[in-house]
Image: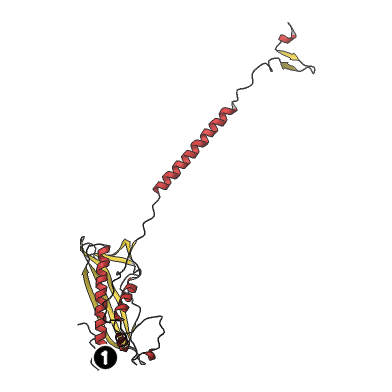
Amino acid sequence: MQESNMPFSSNRSGALQSNHLHSQPAPNVRPARRTYVGARLLQWGAGLALSVTLVGCSVLPKPQAAPSLFDFGVGSAPATATGNADNSRQVLEQRPIFVAPVTARGLPSNTQVMLYRLNYAQDMQLRGYQQSRWSQPVEQLVGQQLRKQLAQQRPVFSDGLNVNFGRLTTSAAPVVLHVNLQRFEQVFSAPAASDAVFQAEVTLVEPGLQGDRLLGQRLFDYSVTAEPADAIGAAKAFAQASAQFTADVNAWVTQLIEHNASGHASPGANP
């Protein structure tokens, strides 16, 4: 038997080695196949992550729309002066009035909320519209309209004005008007029937060196039907109630000042 046909042969160092070592094929590793499978797994994972992200975004709460804002409209208060120089002097000759900031101690702290009450169900619970608000706190809206009405007949002053009263044609110091809102809410007697309820306590005082002198105090109470029975109807009804309130306060203040000037007892109590 020839040496080349033996399964083992010896090399120069005497060690045995297989004659088949170099004749057998190399193991089948296939590195390209592994790379392809890894890429497919990465693609699948990325797609799964994107799907989860999209699903998560679809269930997130959407931002709410901005609430609708309401005020009393642009209608002007009833005017009594024609705007000429004679009427302007007549206004200045009237006793001035200082309008203190209107308060709302009878209302919740956030007075921009449009309040309503369901008298037919849980009438002791005061609620607020979610998507309807007053453009300003209601005491500011009422105060603006009140000053506008009073200024038709007499000088009107408020906080932030530094006025030299000696320059006025009258030597009388201004009287001071205090207004406190006690109720300003929409009351539902049925799901489709409601009224705007407006209630305010008004006090008129005359400042003096020994303290303020009470000229009069009165509770003004109004109820105006809100049509339709929703936030829009409530805004219209409150605008009407506020306009009537400012006109009534103006007439009441004028009566008190005239009675005080003539020396009569002040008709300050509620009629």
Residue in the foreground of this view, choosing between 159 and 203: 159
Q: Residue furthest right?
A: 12
Q: Does the image show residue 119?
A: no
Instruction: Please tell me in which quadrant of the rendered image residue 71 appears.
Output: bottom left
Judge left or right: residue 223 versus residue 111: left
Residue 109 against residue 210 in the figure, above or below: above
Is residue 142 toward the left or the right of residue 19 in the image? left
Badge count = 1
Q: Which quadrant holds the N terminus?
A: top right
Position of the C terminus by quadrant: bottom left
Q: Position of residue 174 (x, y in %)?
A: 34, 87
Tell me where residue 96 appears, x and y as whole percent: 33, 86
Q: Tell me the kind of residue under disc 1.
A: Asn
Outermost residue, front side? 84
- Label 1 Cα crowd, 10 Å radius (few <14 / some 14-19 / many 20+): some
Q: Which residue is drawn at 44% across and 43% down?
A: 52
Q: Is residue 13 above or below residue 147?
A: above
Q: Name the residue at the top extreme.
A: 1
Residue ID for mark 1 = 260
Residue 240 in the image: x percent, y percent? 24, 71
Q: Which residue sits at x=27%, y=66%?
A: 235
Q: Quadrant of residue 77?
A: bottom left
Left or right: 99 as drawn, with respect to 5 = left
- x, y (%) of residue 181? 30, 75
Q: Image quadrant of residue 251?
A: bottom left
Image vertical order of residue 216 relative to residue 76, above or below: below
Q: In this orientation, which residue lies closer to the viewer: 72 or 125?
A: 72
Color scheme of the displayed model:
secondary structure
Examine the rendering and report whether any part of residue 41 can be seen: yes
Q: What kind of element bears circle 1?
A: helix
